[in-house]
Amino acid sequence: MTERFLIALSGPTSSGKTTIATALNEVLSPSIDCTIIHADDFYKPDSEIPVNKDGVQDWDCAAALDIVKFRETLSHIKATGQVTEETLRQGNFDDGVHGSQRISPCTIARARQKVEQWPRGLLTKQKNKNGNNNKNVKSRPIVLVEGFLLFGHSVQESLAPLFDLQILLRATFAAARARRARRNGYVTLQGFWQDPPRYFEDVVWPNYMREHAWLFPRGDVEGEVVDVIVSRPSSPLLLKGPGEAARIDIDSPPRHRVRVGPVGDDVPPDQILDWVLDVVRQALEEAEVEAEVEIEGEAHGQR
């Protein structure tokens, strides 16, 4: 069984998580076995969604998600390499907002060509001399996990250890509010949800800030990040350095880093996709090196 490489793609509402995840799947799938899992599919039934002090259901807090089931599902995938059909559903996918429609076909095609030039050791779908898929490939299939609360402070200990790569997309308050306002609503397990007046200002954004302030200097979720952020269960740590390309000079596995994307209302999704692709390649290469070191260590121990 080949262990899956779990990539967590998170960020505030309307930051492009589903758009980028879907585009990334389109780009990677011709060369690498790739699957998407949506955290939205782990919402509790409508009747179990918490109600806040104002009597409004809070769909944007950790208690609205079945975190136990979510963790069990990801743990099963990690342990067995199997993704069940039940997991591959997405009620809100065809709402005219989610998806990769904001990524141009030319960008998708160009990105696919870029991936085809990656080192062969990273690609699971390699062709042999007969044109068939090579069954002896040792690289790891990818599972993209996208959701709004994957790096939230209240769920870090439950979810962070399962991810091999953590990517945080960003959006300003103004951009996220404008994009969310354009949405028609959300299909739920038992019905349909539409944001009531001021739901974004009073519920959505305050929840995001409260859960993710720990990731940012002074808790400013819209501020610039000039440090490499490392997440460890129970112990977040900021490392001084020139951004996500800084070298890690402490005993910190790459999978414990949160790679933080650019922020700004004018950052095009094509540019974000390019950045995410570069981050994914770097993480896969680092994982390959780790695996080789581990194999060499085991071989040395048997001598």
Image (cartoon, rainbow, N blue to C red):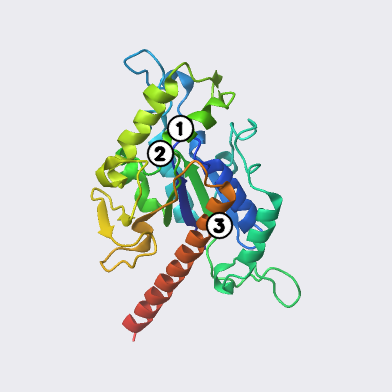
- Can residue 42 be seen here? The reply is no
* 36 versus 94 height, above or below: below
Q: Mark 2 points at which residue?
A: 149
Badge 3 crowding class, 10 Å Cα cut-off, few under 14, some 14 to 19, many 20 or more, is some
Residue 157: give x, y in percent of width and height: 30, 45
- Residue 292's place in the image compared with 95, above or below, is below
Residue in front for this viewpoint, 59 or 11:
11
Q: Earlier in the sequence, mark 3 or mark 1?
A: 1
Q: Can residue 86 be seen in this view?
A: yes
Asked if residue 60 lies left or right of residue 180, the reply is left
Residue sitting at x 61%, y 35% = 93
Q: Residue extending furthest front?
A: 266
Vertical order, 174 against 267 (above or below): above
Q: Are marks 1 and 2 in contact (CB under 8 Å)?
A: no
Task: Name the front one of labels 1 and 2.
Answer: 1
**Residue annotated with mark 3:** 274
- The amino acid beneath tag 3 is Asp
- Residue at the limit of the structure toward the bottom, as seen here: 303
- SS of the residue under disc 3: helix
Q: Callout 2: few (<14), some (14-19), or many (20+) C-alpha neighbours within 10 Å?
A: many
Q: Which of marks 3 and 2 is nearer the N terminus?
A: 2
Q: Position of residue 80 (x, y in %)?
A: 49, 55
Residue identifier under label 1? 174
Q: Distance between the residues labelled 1 and 2?
A: 20 Å
Mark closer to the observer (3, 1): 1
Query: At which x and y percent is residue 249?
Result: 27, 69
**Mark 2: which amino acid?**
Leu
Q: How far apart are marks 3 and 2 (CA)?
A: 23 Å
Residue lying at 35% horizontally and 57% vertically, measured from the top left: 257
x and y, in percent, of residue 233 in the image: 27, 50
Q: What residue type is labelled 1?
A: Ala
